[in-house]
Image (cartoon, grey):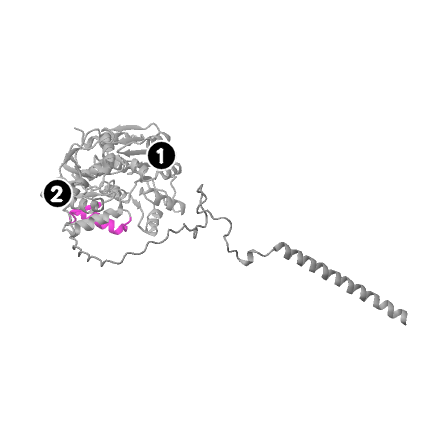
Amino acid sequence: MTKFTDLDLDAKVLKAISEAGYESPTPIQAAAIPHALNGRDVLGIAQTGTGKTASFTLPMITKLAKGRARARMPRSLVLCPTRELAAQVAENFEIYAKHLKLTMALLIGGVSFKEQDKLIDRGVDVLIATPGRLLDHFERGKLMLTGVQIMVVDEADRMLDMGFIPDIERIFKLTPFTRQTLFFSATMAPEITRITQEFLQNPERVEVARQATTSENITQKVCMFKASHRSKEGKEKRALLRDILKMEGDTLSNGIIFCNRKSEVDIVAKSLKKHGFDAGAIHGDLDQALRTKTLDGFRAGDLKILVASDVAARGLDVPAVSHVVNFDVPIHAEDYVHRIGRTGRAGRDGKAITLVLPFEQKHLDKIEELVKKQIDRMDPPNGPAAGPSDAADTKEDKPKRERTPRKPREPKAEQPAKEPQEKREPSNKGNQRGSNRSDGRNKVVGMGDHVPAFMMRSFEIKRATRRKKDEADAQNTQTDLEENAETPASDESAT
């Protein structure tokens, strides 16, 4: 069996490894570290929980042991998709580089720019960052990447899921062409393959396990669930979760419950607290200080159950997690591998339980296709849940409302018979549109006998009368003008 002493690591690094309690490397470490020490680009593919972080931290520390960092120009760069994963990598560097005088800076969101700028200005050997915060510092002119000698991309497939691929491509172009690149991931999507072909120089491919495989130490179960009514789905599903946690009993030392939505994380965590479970929540919308406090409490054992979104699926390294429960089936099949990879780490046994609603069956099919096996089914702790049809059968019949019997009507007094009236002709009153009957009955012709007076007036006569009046007025006006014109002439002749 290969030991760390056989890997040509720095003596101070080996001392730190021994103090941490490790003797033999994992398969991915044994395969990747020699190539990284030789300066080759490495493409590492291995399931989560196999020690990929140490696969690049140990050779990086050994290679950076000699040299000195300059202000604002880090010597190495590690890119991580989440704050938690970046913090985990930083912890690994602190453990393995404690006997070396190497400086490190952590650039993540939720932390003051001012404090991070101070660290960069002093010069750092190792810069660990999330893509967004790294580019923020670069665009502010506080960081230069031209001195990067070693670049690491950790959890590359998660970068793809979170939409960081354009940022990764931009960062690659900001670093020197002569850099050494270490690329690690649990799965390799086509887009990830394209990036490795574009930015890695003849990489050494290290694949110690089939892509998207799960650890054999993890017992996987699926619990099919169908709510009695759609409006009660959330409530009954949370009740099922509590029953499962109680059923596991003492075997549940601590566990992580994964939800697809951040809002669902808060709801499940509050529900568990309300029913006496020691639970805490973590997702991307929480303040960084609160997230760190919650994770530290879970690692220390002060918190038994952690309800999380996928933000914690890639960045939580707690070796002794006994259970993982998927409250929601992950939409992306690859996320299932990373979620359940939080248990069964470092050779320990673990258990993963997934709650599946009918509409989530399609996601389960994709997961089983990815892991290439059918996951065992389990019965709900309290028996099968009643579906809509069962609910209709067991529903109590509503009591029929009794009606008060009506009182019998009293017979009316006999009235004298009326004399027969003459048969009246059908009237056309109210029939404004007439009828199309062929016999002519009920057909209204014209306006009837009565015609309003204004309808009888002749407008032509009125117009003619007005025209004659206008002509007469014009003739009278012309006569007046002629008379007025003749009067001055007679006066002159008289003079």
The residue at the far left in this view is: 250
Mark 2 touches mark 1? (CB < 8 Å): no
Where is residue 268 shown, x and y percent of the image? 20, 48
Q: Quadrant of the C terminus?
A: bottom right
Q: Is residue 306 magenta?
A: yes
When asked about the image quadrant of residue 435, the answer is top left
> Label 1: which residue?
179
Q: Is residue 108 magenta?
A: no
> Label 2: which residue?
252
Q: Residue at x 90, y 69 (%)?
A: 493
Badge 2: few (under 14), some or many (20 or more) residues near its Cα, within 10 Å?
Answer: some
Toward the viewer: 127 or 377?
Answer: 377
Q: Amino acid at mark 1?
A: Arg
Q: Residue at x 35, y 49 (%)?
A: 117
Q: Which region is colored magenta?
A: 285-307
Answer left or right for 317 relative to 174.
Answer: left
For residue 93, say whether it is visible. no
When asked about the image quadrant of residue 414, the answer is bottom left
Q: Amino acid at mark 2?
A: Leu
Answer left or right for 227 relative to 114.
Answer: left
Where is residue 432 shown, x and y percent of the image? 45, 50
Which of the two discs, 2 and 1, sits closer to the camera? 2
Give above or below for 407 relative to 79.
below
Q: Quadrant of the N terminus?
A: top left
Cα separation between marks 2 and 1: 46 Å
Give above or below for 453 relative to 106.
below
Where is residue 7 shown, x and y percent of the image? 22, 31
Q: What secondary structure is marked by label 2?
A: loop
